């Protein structure tokens, strides 16, 4: 019995996405009947609730050309997209690191005033 | 005829349960299931968890004093030496399949939804690779079953199942098995189903 696909179906449903969004604003809104001792299934559900919330937000902002409603609703395609997205983010981070390294070694042009330009000769 | 009717009812209830997308699997920390009548498993209470931990410690001492007690690492070395099973080769196979899976996922992610044939083809390949990885895990678990760690893990699930499985009698939930003896004599289909659900409940909770 595989509960994961059922849980993902629930987590991406408009019902639970609306509840999740409302719960972030209304602190007293409970997602579950129990308020402690959460089960493994509840923990997995919370994970996917956040993932799908993020994906719907990125879809609304048109952040990724490969992200669509069809991709979100298909578990296999969704996993593939999440993996590709992770690689893209790693690649961007690496590029930023390289650019930062390069900028650290740029010196100021001669003639710019610096705090250490002190004329000690007194002429 | 009666048996057929009963089987049909059980199958129908199973289908309803399996294809049921309502909230019950996450609305609280219990899982309800049906085998002729209604049962449920729940997260153990603090007292029950202490009892489980205590029993586990006792069991570990018992197993350690038994003839043939062997740790996971010792078993891995023994199996490799005997030429029966090599964990290193299995890990290499697993890495190969994981690499394949990553490649297929990257390809699938960049396919347009209009490209149904290629999407289905890649999804099949991903499914097949995932099944191969599952088979490897099952084979590894099978070979490592006799080790101390696997036996203890099995015991924890069984003992937890004994403690937390309840049946609906009227409007009340009551424990199915009062004693460990009752549990050991129980119907295996109920025990198996309850154990699987307990494993799901405790997923991510056990390090």
Image (tube, rainbow, N blue to C red):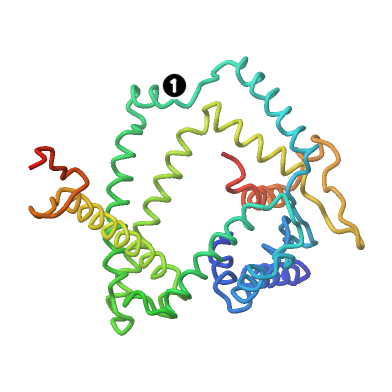
Apparent side of residue B204 relative to residue B134 in the rendered image (left or right): right
Looking at the rendering, in which quadrant would you find the N terminus of chain B? bottom right
Q: Quadrant of residue A30?
A: bottom right
Q: Quadrant of residue B95?
A: top left
Q: Check the image and name the residue furthest to the bottom.
A: B114
Residue at position x 59%, y 71% in the image:
A10
Looking at the rendering, in which quadrant would you find the C terminus of chain B? top right
Apparent side of residue B31 relative to residue A107 in the rendered image (left or right): right
Residue at position x 54%, y 67% in the image:
A8
For disc 1, the marked residue is B74
Q: Nearer the viewer, residue B23 or A26?
A: A26
Chain letter of mark 1 equals B
Q: Check the image and name the residue furthest to the front.
A: A123
Q: Where residue A97 sits in the image (x, y, percent)?
A: 25, 52
Figure label count: 1
Q: Where residue B162 sits in the image (x, y, percent)?
A: 76, 42
Q: Where residue A17 sits in the image (x, y, percent)?
A: 59, 74
Q: Nearer the viewer, residue B8 or A64?
A: A64
How busy is the neighbourhood of tag 1: few (under 14 within 10 Å), some, or many (20 plus)? few
Q: Is residue B183 above or below residue A92?
A: above
Q: Nearer the viewer, residue B169 or A109?
A: A109
Apparent side of residue B117 relative to residue A24 in the rendered image (left or right): left
- SS type, badge 1: helix
Residue at position x 59%, y 61% in the image:
A46
Q: Is residue A106 above or below residue A57?
A: above
Q: Where residue A25 sits in the image (x, y, percent)?
A: 65, 70
Residue at position x 87%, y 51% in the image:
B174
């Amino acid at each position: 019995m595989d509960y994961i696909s059922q849980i993902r179906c629930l987590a991406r449903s408009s019902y639970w996405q609306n509840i999740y969004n409302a719960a972030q604003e209304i602190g007293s809104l409970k997602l579950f009947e129990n308020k402690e001792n959460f089960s493994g299934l509840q923990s997995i559900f919370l994970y996917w609730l956040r993932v799908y919330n993020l994906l719907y937000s990125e879809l609304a902002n048109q952040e990724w050309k490969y992200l669509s409603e069809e991709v979100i609703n298909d578990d296999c395609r969704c996993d593939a997209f999440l993996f590709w997205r992770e690689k893209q983010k790693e690649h961007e981070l690496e590029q930023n690191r390289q650019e930062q390294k390069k900028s650290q070694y740029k010196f100021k042009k001669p003639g710019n005033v610096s705090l250490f330009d002190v004329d000690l000769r007194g002429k | 005829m009666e048996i057929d009717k009963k089987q049909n009812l059980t199958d129908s209830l199973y289908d309803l349960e399996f294809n049921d997308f309502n909230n019950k699997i996450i609305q609280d920390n219990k899982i309800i299931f049906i085998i002729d009548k209604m049962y449920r498993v729940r997260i153990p209470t603090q007292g029950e968890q202490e009892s489980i931990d205590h029993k586990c410690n006792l069991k570990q001492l018992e197993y350690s004093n038994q003839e043939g007690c062997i740790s996971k690492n010792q078993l891995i070395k023994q199996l490799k030496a005997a030429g029966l099973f090599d964990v290193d080769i299995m890990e290499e196979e697993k890495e190969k399949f994981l690499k394949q899976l990553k490649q297929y996922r990257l390809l699938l992610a960049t396919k347009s939804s209009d490209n149904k044939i290629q999407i289905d083809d890649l999804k099949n390949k991903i499914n097949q690779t995932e099944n191969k990885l599952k088979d490897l895990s099952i084979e590894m678990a099978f070979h490592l079953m006799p080790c101390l760690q696997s036996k203890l893990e099995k015991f924890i699930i069984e003992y937890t199942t004994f403690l937390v499985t309840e049946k609906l009698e009227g409007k009340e939930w009551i424990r199915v098995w009062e004693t460990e003896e009752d549990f050991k004599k129980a119907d295996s289909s109920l025990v198996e189903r309850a154990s699987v659900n307990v494993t799901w409940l405790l997923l991510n909770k056990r390090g």
